[in-house]
Image (cartoon, rainbow, N blue to C red):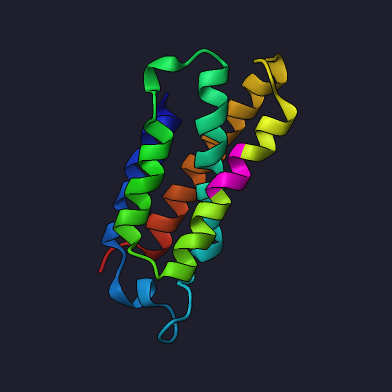
């Protein structure tokens, strides 16, 4: 579960990004980490679907709550907020279309999502975090 802890900690650390990184190169432009953030949102959506499907019911709404915390931290414009939410929903629905029960492939998908999410969150914080 080390990857899980890294993902959660790093995703919530996004609020410590430097103002220049968060603002992007010009007013209204997405930040340079925007593509990675969209992928992270997609991963959170996938985990929101897959974890309960594979019997991890104790987490409840954890991944949705993490997504909300990420949005609250980012304080995106309405358009960017809609894109972040669409990424989360895409992650959720793409797995809902494929998996109706927890299969060995679904368990592998969970592990891959956790690993990629932790890597992305870490890279965003390392490359763009701090002042």
Pick the quarter of the image with the C terminus.
bottom left
The answer to which image quadrant residue 57 occupies is top left
As for residue 91 lying within the magenta part, the answer is: yes
94 sits to left or right of 11: right
Direction right: furthest residue = 98
| Magenta span includes 75 | no
Q: Residue at x 38, y 16 (%)?
A: 58
Does the rendering let one see residue 14?
no
In the rendered image, the vertical position of residue 52 relative to residue 73, given as above or below: above
- Which secondary structure class fits the magenta region best? helix
Quadrant housing the N terminus: top left
Q: Nearer the viewer, residue 79 or 11?
A: 79
Q: Which residues are magenta?
A: 88-92
Q: Residue at x 45, y 62 (%)?
A: 81
User: Where is residue 40 shown, x and y percent of the image?
Assistant: 51, 49
On screen, residue 38 above or below 105: below
Q: Is residue 129 left or right of residue 115?
A: left
Q: Is residue 10 visible?
A: yes
Q: Position of residue 67 (x, y in %)?
A: 41, 45
At 44% from the left edge and 57% from the top edge, which residue is drawn?
124
Q: Nearer the viewer, residue 114 or 122?
A: 114
Q: Position of residue 116 (x, y in %)?
A: 56, 41
114 left or right of 9?
right
**Location of residue 6 (image quadrant):** top left
Q: Residue furthest bottom?
A: 26
């Amino acid at each position: 579960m080390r990857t899980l802890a890294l993902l959660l900690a790093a995703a919530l650390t996004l609020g410590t990004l430097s103002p220049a990184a968060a603002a992007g190169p010009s007013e209204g432009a997405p930040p340079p980490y925007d593509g990675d953030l969209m992928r992270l949102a997609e991963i959170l959506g996938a985990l929101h679907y897959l974890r309960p499907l594979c019997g991890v019911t104790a987490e409840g709404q954890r991944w949705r709550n993490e997504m909300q915390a990420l949005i609250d931290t980012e304080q995106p414009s309405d358009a960017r907020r809609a894109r972040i939410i669409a990424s989360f929903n895409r992650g959720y629905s793409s797995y809902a279309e494929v998996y109706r029960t927890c299969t060995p492939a679904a368990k592998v998908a969970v592990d891959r999502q956790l690993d990629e999410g932790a890597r992305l969150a870490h890279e965003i914080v390392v490359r763009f975090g701090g002042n």
